[in-house]
Amino acid sequence: MKSNIKDKLQKIDKEYYSLLIDIGKVSKDQGLKSYLVGGMIRDLLLNFDNLDIDIVVEDNAKQLADAIVKKFSNCELAARHDRFHTAKIIFNIDGKKIPIDLASTREEIYEHSAALPTVKVSDLKKDLYRRDFTINALAVSILPEDFGDVVDLFNGLIDLKEKKIKVLHELSFIDDPTRMIRAIRFACKLGFTIEENTQRLLKEAVESKQFDNLIEKIRGDRVKIEIRYLFNLPDIESAVKAFFDSGIYRMLSTDLNPRRDVVCNVSTGDNTSRQWLIHLALIIKDLNPEKQEKILKNLQMTGEEIKIIKDGFSAFNRLKEKEPVDSIEIYRELKNLSIESTLIVKLLPNTQDLIRNTLFDEYIEKTSKIKLEITGQDLITMGVKEGKRVGEILDKVLEMKIKNTQMNKNDEVAEAKKLI
């Protein structure tokens, strides 16, 4: 029985829906068959929000991209990769940029396990067959005559209904071992179970040990991307537990200690995109600095990401040597740290006593938000020369205000005058 999800597509953002209609019309005019694919379909069927538009074209994405850019003045070609037969276009609608990824239907040939695949243009069936799991191997036509028709060649709709993560073929994890992390992630994110045969294949791949220390053998950023998604999940307890229980932690390093005390819930406020760095830091905390450095470099972490983790470790080590500590000492160590570095310090084991925990919570919730009313310009007006001394006085006054939060601007001025 043919399935159609036009009714669900009509409920997405109207601008995105209109773009799908328009692209489908251009595709028909060009004599091309185009399909919506990827996570957007899966999430639509699960009633999740997802507006990442990925379109596959039989068999010329370049032709469709050029035709769309030519037809719509508010659309530009942002990128094109001939090797992978892909293109990215961006629509500008009333100042809002909407990116759309286009790809020719293609197949992937892996010369050896974990290699980057050789890509060649193929048909829709082979394109869907190269994907990771059946629930991600669905396609939906965007052509006018059958808009919304679902192409389900591998029973992905059944697996969605039965809440199963299932690979499409026996060599899936061998071809691309990062799919093992993805299987764990989707299971945790969606509350699905990994289908029995898929679980067997994952276990066999881990136990073969051919993927131990994988980040030393392939481009580490491929693993980093999956780790980032996994450790940014809201249910971090399930994510970390599955990471260790499955054995896929060995892909990062066989030196890791699969302890459960790294599991914790954290809040980084509005910016949750970097909370994965906190969990990665807690996972590598027991390794010596050389091994930590090796993992971070092999993952191809950015300088900023490495700094966040190293700043947390360094502040932790300095505080560990200072006993006892008070709110001012905590402030001095943490004042220049990011919220992620601060949470790394707070969550490392030696700072888990009640007194320090209270001081950390006080810093995060109160002390870090205390601001002076006086400024550097006020000090210069009082006669302080521009330079380092201005900052030193402001820091001293702020420390006084931390001890006495009732201070007002007049009090701050009075204390600053004493220091001049």
Image (spheres, rainbow, N blue to C red):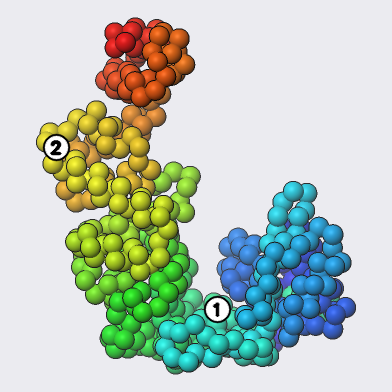
Q: Is residue 314 left or right of residue 46?
A: left
Q: Quadrant of the N terminus?
A: bottom right
- Of 127 and 316, the residue lying toward us: 316
Return the residue at label 1: 135
| Residue 245 position within the rendered picture, expressed as x and y whole percent measured from the top left | 28, 73
Residue 42: image location, x then y, percent: 59, 72
Give the vertical position of 265 relative to 8 (above or below). above
Q: Residues within 10 Å of mark 1 (few under 14, many from 20)?
A: many
Q: Is residue 310 left or right of residue 218?
A: left
* Residue that carries the numbered disc 2 in the rendered image: 322
Q: Amino acid at mark 2?
A: Lys
Where residue 12 sits in the image (x, y, percent)?
Answer: 70, 60
Camera-side residue of 416 and 340: 416
Residue drawn at point x = 55 percent, y = 78 percent: 135
User: Residue flagged by tag 1: what amino acid is it?
Assistant: Ile
Can residue 1 be seen? yes
Q: Is residue 127 left or right of residue 213?
A: right
Question: How far is disc 2 from disc 1 in space, using C-alphas?
Answer: 53 Å
Q: Secondary structure at mark 2?
A: loop
Residue 271 lies, in percent from the top left, at 47, 47
